Amino acid sequence: MTAAVLEVPSEPIVKPAPSRRNRRQSRLAWVAQHSIAIVLVIMFVTPVVYLVLLSLMTSNQALTSNYWPQTWHPENYVKVFQATPLPRYLLNTVIYAVTATVLTIASSVPAAYALAKLKFRGRNVLFLTIICVMMLPPQVVTVPLYLMWARYHLTGSLWPLIIPALFGDAFCIFLLRQFLLTIPSEYLDAARVDGCGEWRTLLRVVLPMAKPGIAAAGLFQFFFCWNDYYGPLLYTSENEKAWTLTLGLASFRSVHHVDWNLVTAATVLAMAPLIIIFFFAQRAFVQGITLTGFKG
């Protein structure tokens, strides 16, 4: 007879709760591991926080040694809307930024696809030309471009800033080309074997795989148009109804150069949409940047 083996139920192992000293050591270790990131966050966040605090001060307290408002004045933001047509400036900026970004991406993606995945004579020379265009200062072509738009009676409007987006942007083409080089060519060859042409391959195969790169290029272009001051100053300065936020903010600062609390309040209102957009799109933006491969 075999002896029966009695199984003694094992008691669950209870881990001792970490002591206060261990928790403190783990926190210090976490701070030490992320010290560089913490310092960078403080460097970037501190000016923004100070700008918000300054916008809630009185004009007498602004730009003094007091960094904390003695009395809070949120009505400064209401005064900004009363003193300047900020909604109109915001609408013009949105029209310029959104339209130019959509047109730039629509025209830059096919160019980047041709440079990255199509083999034709002079491809490297064309890509080198695009690199040279990136290095060309915009002030070099200011006079002939202004004369051209003035001849067509388009100055004083946003059209001289929007129409060039139909022909792509050198930086967007460069960024998208580098991202498209990371897509394996086997996917494209399989689509061509199935009977897809180049345009159908681009729309059905490449675009779904290139969403992070397109998002990154789109955000770069949108931020550039939103913060653009030179272009609106050059083409729309004669017509206040076509001013963007940057031009309106510069004019508001020249009029209220003593009331720095109102100037900073207007600056916060101009910055807020960009911060909100980047907060919701940061994952796609970071993914598009990290996946961009720099291949020849």
Image (spheres, rainbow, N blue to C red):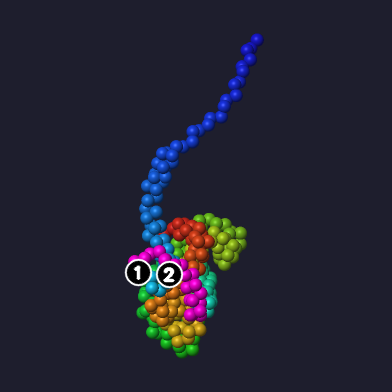
Q: Name the residue at 36% across, 75% down.
A: 137
> Would you place residue 202 above or below residue 225 in this image?
above
Q: Distance between the residues labelled 1 and 2?
A: 10 Å
Which of these two is toward me, 16 or 258? 258
Whether residue 70 is in magenta: the answer is yes
Work out which quarter of the rendered image holds the N terminus and state it.
Answer: top right
Where residue 196 appears, as percent x and y from the top left, is: 60, 63
Q: Name the residue at 47% across, 73% down.
A: 76
Where residue 286 appears, as percent x and y from the top left, is: 47, 58
SS for tag 1?
loop
The residue under label 1 is 64
Residue segment shown in magenta? 64-85
Does residue 45 appear in this view? yes
SS for tag 2?
loop
Identified by mark 2, the residue type is Met
Does residue 162 appear in this view? no
Where residue 9 appears, as percent x and y from the top left, is: 60, 24
Identified by mark 1, the residue type is Thr
Badge number at residue 281: none
Mark toward the start of the polypeptide (1 vs 2): 2
Number of numbered discs overlaid on the protein picture: 2
- Is residue 30 found left or right of 85 in the rendered image? left
Residue extending furthest right? 1
Whether residue 259 is in magenta: the answer is no
The residue under label 2 is 57
Which of these two is toward me, 236 or 148? 236
Q: Name the residue at 57% across, 25% down.
A: 10
